Image (spheres, rainbow, N blue to C red):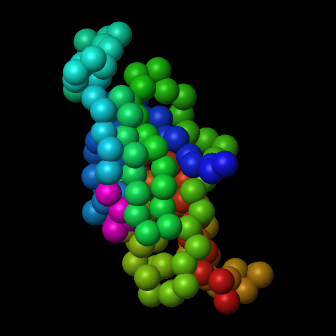
Amino acid sequence: MQLANYLFFTTVCEQALAFYTQCGLGEIVEVKRFGDGNMPVLNEAMRGKIMHAKFEGLGILFYASDNDDAEPMRGSAHILWTDDREQTLALFNRLAEGGTVTTPIGIQPWGDYYGKLTDKFGVQWMLDCPA
């Protein structure tokens, strides 16, 4: 058994995954689009949008798609554990571009170097570099 997150975007999945690639999290390793091959198209506005994508990087695995009736993302966050403060700060700053920092990155009361943000696509991220 394995647990992986599945992110639903309304129509910006491709842009979000490109952003995560630019941030250095990994890359798209599988993609299926609405209307390609035998893939159904229930709404013509979704033709060519991502029906299913797999995103992988070192220690990273999640899936994503466009879904024109997707609910706003809330109540869930990706947490990334790192082992280097400089790497953590750089990744935090890249993910925060255009987003909202909810906990500024820094040493927290429990001793870890930690920060939390919501990126420009509405996905919450927590970065933790243990003391």
Nearest the viewer among 102 and 32 is: 32
Residue 100 in sight in this render = no
The outermost residue toward the right is 110
Give the left or right position of residue 53, taking residue 61 as reference. Answer: left
Q: Quadrant of residue 13?
A: top left
Q: Which residues are magenta?
A: 23-27
The outermost residue toward the front is 1
Nearest the viewer among 6 and 12 is: 6
Image coordinates of residue 31 in percent, x first then y, are 30, 39
How many numbered discs, if any? 0
Q: Please say if 67 is above or below 79.
A: above
Q: Please say if 1 is above or below 33.
A: below
Which residue is at a point 47% across and 20% down the rendered structure image?
Answer: 69
Nearest the viewer among 10 and 47 is: 47
Which residue is at a point 43% across and 40% down the rendered structure image?
Answer: 64
Image coordinates of residue 94 in percent, x first then y, are 37, 68
Task: Confirm whether the magenta stretch covers residue 125.
Answer: no
Q: Please say if 105 is above or below 16.
A: below
Q: Main secondary structure of the magenta part?
A: loop
Give the left or right position of residue 106, taking residue 112 as reference. Answer: left
Q: Please say if 95 is above or below 13.
A: below
Give the left or right position of residue 92, taking residue 11 as reference. Answer: right
Q: Quadrant of residue 20?
A: bottom left
Which residue is at a point 52% across and 41% down the rendered structure image?
Answer: 6
Residue 117 in sight in this render = yes
Image coordinates of residue 128 in percent, x first then y, are 61, 75
Which residue is at a point 67% across and 89% down the rendered structure image?
Answer: 131
